[in-house]
Image: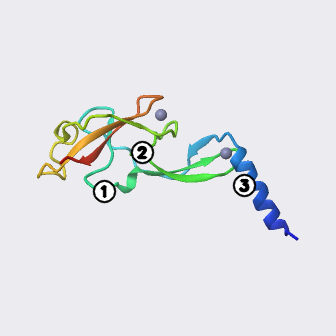
């Protein structure tokens, strides 16, 4: 025999998996920092994903929540960014910040829905 808590958990799971989700950001997070190119934000720096790239989204309909990173998720519409095929010169986006040996290039990822764009470092061999 199931108790009331198990019953409610099952009901909540059902509601959350059938929900169409209305996400909004529910964690405080730092201002996004722009790269040297206006309106393109700094993402991954070297091998590090900076702490301020993380945000929590919560659905107002079903209270489901999850952690996302704007290095791969749009912070406006919460869909996955599309990465460029080419690796660009890091110089143009970040100057020589954290990479005086030239180990990294920049891969730019864009939201397919709006203008959100981020420049992530990637090994350049
Ligand atoms: Zn939901
Ligand atoms: Zn978007």
* Closer to the eye: label 2 or 3: 3
Q: Where residue 37 sits: x, y (%)? A: 25, 33
| SS label for mark 1 | loop
Q: Residues within 10 Å of mark 1 (few under 14, many from 20)?
A: few
In 3D space, how far apart are the residues under numbered discs 1 and 2 (Cα atoms)? 13 Å
Earlier along the polypeptide chain: callout 2 or callout 3? Answer: 3
Residue 13: numbered disc = 3
Residue at point 22%, 36% (across, down) = 88
| SS label for mark 3 | helix
| SS label for mark 2 | loop
Q: Residues within 10 Å of mark 2 (few under 14, many from 20)?
A: many
Residue closest to the eye, 17 or 39:
17
Residue 115: numbered disc = none
Q: Where residue 4 sits: x, y (%)? A: 84, 66
Earlier along the polypeptide chain: callout 1 or callout 2? Answer: 1
Residue under label 2 = 70
Residue at point 56%, 53% (across, down) = 66
In this picture the colour scheme is: rainbow
């Amino acid at each position: 025999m199931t108790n009331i808590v198990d019953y409610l958990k099952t009901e909540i799971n059902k509601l959350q998996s059938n929900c169409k989700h209305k996400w909004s950001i529910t964690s405080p997070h730092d201002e996004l920092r722009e790269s040297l190119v206006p309106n393109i934000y700094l993402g991954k720096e070297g091998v590090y994903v900076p702490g301020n790239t993380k945000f929590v989204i919560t659905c107002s309909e079903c209270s489901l929540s999850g952690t996302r990173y704007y290095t791969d998720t749009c912070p406006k519409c919460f869909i996955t960014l599309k990465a460029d095929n080419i690796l660009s010169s890091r110089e143009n986006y970040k100057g020589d910040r954290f990479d005086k040996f030239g180990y990294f290039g920049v891969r730019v990822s864009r939201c397919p829905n709006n203008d959100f764009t981020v420049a992530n470092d990637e090994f350049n061999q």
